[in-house]
Image (spheres, helix red, strand yellow):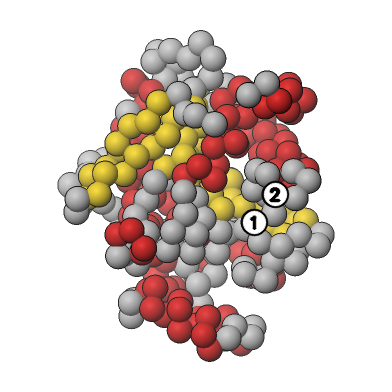
Amino acid sequence: MQATRTEVFKAVKGAKLRIHIFEPEGHKPGDKRPAIVFFFGGGWVGGSPGQFFAQCKYLATRGVVAMSAEYRVKTRHGVTPYECVTDGKSAVRWVRANAGRLGVDPGRIAAGGGSAGGHVAACTGTIEGLEGKGEDAAVSSRPDALVLFNPALSLDFAEWEKRGASAERMAQLRERFDGRDPRRISPFHHVAKGAPPTVIFHGKADKTVPYATIERFAEAAKQAGNRCELVGYGSKGHGFFNFGRGDGESFYQTVAATDKFLVSLGWLEGEPTLEQFRASLGKE
């Protein structure tokens, strides 16, 4: 699947970070459409923005300017998750700052992502600070909605050890953070009133990010007065939502639910158009 076009949204320490933009048919710069920017998973170590190209392609058919952004990761750039969060904020700010020429409504920008990318997206809506150097702080890096797929939302190493994480796993995680406190960028530990409306899709059999940690986040968000919908999927494990995974039905189910969530916000109208989308994929 190919994006309509690709642009560089940030250049930092020799890295040019690109954002892949999927535009609705007939889209014009003067339009004010809703937008979403996705962040890929990969444990803050690797991954590719292509992970969310299928979601972008579908949402573009529904009138959304859908994007999938790069961000720095450990294997390619030698960074910690802190820099991943900074890049995520830079991407949201770039979309809002360029809303006029992108044909985007600056008040209807969502952030989404899966696993570590879900963490990055969630941080753009919950964590203060960590803004990109030299960027215009007058332009908010906070999205107006969050669409999260098996996100890591509670970064508490003591809790992970209590839940049975292996010594090897904990050593890997500590190495990724390079001595920095993970709770500083743990969305659960920064839940506050006024967070963007959120929907979370999570497998109840997820062994990488335990479902119970997501339940705790959703409950804390609701107690703070925020809208947070948690959609659990029976025996599904980590990454169940990805395009091409299994029989593909989980992809379509989560995309339809994403569509309905955006409709509930007043960003879209009508019912999901998944049958037409399936048919279009068959012609590629």
Label 2 crowd bin: few (<14), some (14–19), many (20+), radius 10 Å: few
Q: Which residue is mark 2?
A: 245
Residue ID at (65%, 43%): 243
Front in this rendered view, residue 139 or 280: 280
Q: Position of residue 141 (x, y in %)?
A: 36, 45
Dot 1, crowdedness within 10 Å: few (<14), some or many (≥20)?
many
Pick whichever of labels 1 and 2 is earlier in the sequence. Answer: 1
Residue 1 picture location, percent across and down: 54, 31
**Residue 226 spot, x, y in % from top left:** 59, 52
- What amino acid is labelled 1 in the image? Gly
Viewer-nearest residue: 239 or 268 = 239
Identify the mark at residue 239; answer none if there is no mark: 1
In contact (CB < 8 Å): disc 1 and disc 2: yes
Task: Residue 83: name its quadrant.
Answer: bottom left
Quick check: 128 left or right of 119?
left
The Cα–Cα distance between marks 1 and 2, rounded to whole angstroms, is: 8 Å
- Residue nearer the viewer, 176 or 104: 176
In the displayed structure image, the side of residue 187 where residue 164 appears, left or right: right
